[in-house]
Amino acid sequence: MPRLLDVTALATIASLLAGTAGAEEWKFAIEEIPGSIMDTYAQEFKKRVEEATDGEVTVTIYPLGALGTPTEVVEQAADGVLQFANVSIGNLGTIVPESQIFLLNYILPDDRARLNEILATSPVIYDELGTDFESKGLKLGALYSEGPQVWTTNREIRTPEDFDNFKMRVMVSPVLLQAYSDLGASPTPIPFGEVYGALQLKQVDGQVNPVPAIEEMKFYEVTDYMIWAGEQELVTAVVAGIDWYETLSPDRQALVDETIAGLNDFIVPVVDRFNAEKLEKIKAAKPGIQMIELTTEERAAFRTRAEATHAKVAEVAGDRGAELLDALLAEVGAQ
């Protein structure tokens, strides 16, 4: 059963349903805190939309926890309670299973320019996967990466064997559960807002997130190592409710499309800056934390393990997921 919303979230949702007199209001929920990468994206979206409409449209941003879990806010977008949501792909597993191919380890290019181009322009993503979002009541506006995923752990991990009896916190996603099991860990799904406490209380031994999230949520305080294994990027999705979008005038639809397209170039240097600045903050706050970048040879052992997950993708993301994975790998390999 889905988790019940708390009283605050229920009250907030009630206010959304009540609507706002006067200017047209677009509600934009994100799964991160104010001042984060997602917040920077949403604030720029707000600025551009409000300027383009001379204030006829106002954009209200709801950060982490204001309206429930990330999965719940996506459901609210599909239901028309709010207009936009920006969440990690890992939180879409129960809504758009096919999107989970982006959680597979070692499928995206290492080169950041190629990675960003694929996420912004890929026909497999926007012409193919986009139809799977639409079938769930969602319009896929954009995918973008928040940077390389990093393991923060309470012990050194250099081989799959080091993951033995290791509880790794992951997002609620069948693909992630399979992926980290195949790497040798014991994957443990825990809501994002509860990860710090789980690490502190030793309920889990590590977690995986990009550097900005690790710094903002202070995960480095309750772990001893930061490990770059090159296995994933944190891919996030910007979605809108398709029913709401289709009620818009052609001019408003064009405004949404053009604003989101324009943000593709905006967000890339923002992500680079956040990753660099947040890493320096972590180093200053905890000089003793051990930072490890796995060698090519060490990564190869994990890559081999990851192939098992690729072979099982149909079991966790359906035949359609397997079809999209093959198309994406062909697209990546062709560039």
Image (tube, grey):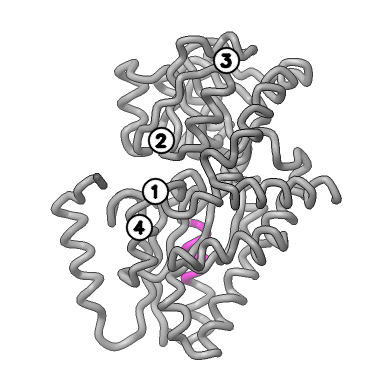
Magenta stretch in the rendered image? 40-46
Element type where label 4 sits in the image: helix
Location of mark 3 (residue): 290
Q: Nearest to the eye among marks 1 and 4: give it.
A: 4
Q: Secondary structure at mark 1?
A: loop
The amino acid on which the numbered mark 2 sits, given as a three-letter code, is Met
Provide residue 172's location: percent of width, then percent of height: 41, 39
Residue 217 numbered mark, or none: 2
Q: Nearer the viewer, residue 331 or 234?
A: 331
Task: Give SS at disc 2.
Answer: loop
Report the side of 33 relative to 123 (left or right).
left
Q: For this rendering, which residue is in front, 221 or 70?
A: 70
Point out the frontmost of discs 3 and 4: 4
Identity, as a three-letter code, of the amino acid under mark 1: Ile
Residue that extends furthest to the left in the rendered view of this protein: 7
- Mark 3 vs mark 1: which is more N-terminal? 1
Q: CA distance from mark 1 to mark 2?
A: 9 Å
Q: Are marks 1 and 2 in contact (CB under 8 Å)?
A: yes
Q: Residues within 10 Å of mark 3 (few under 14, many from 20)?
A: some
User: Residue 240: x, y in percent?
Assistant: 46, 68
Residue 262 visible in this rendered orientation of the protein? yes
Assess whether mark 4 and mark 3 are in contact (beta carbons under 8 angstroms): no
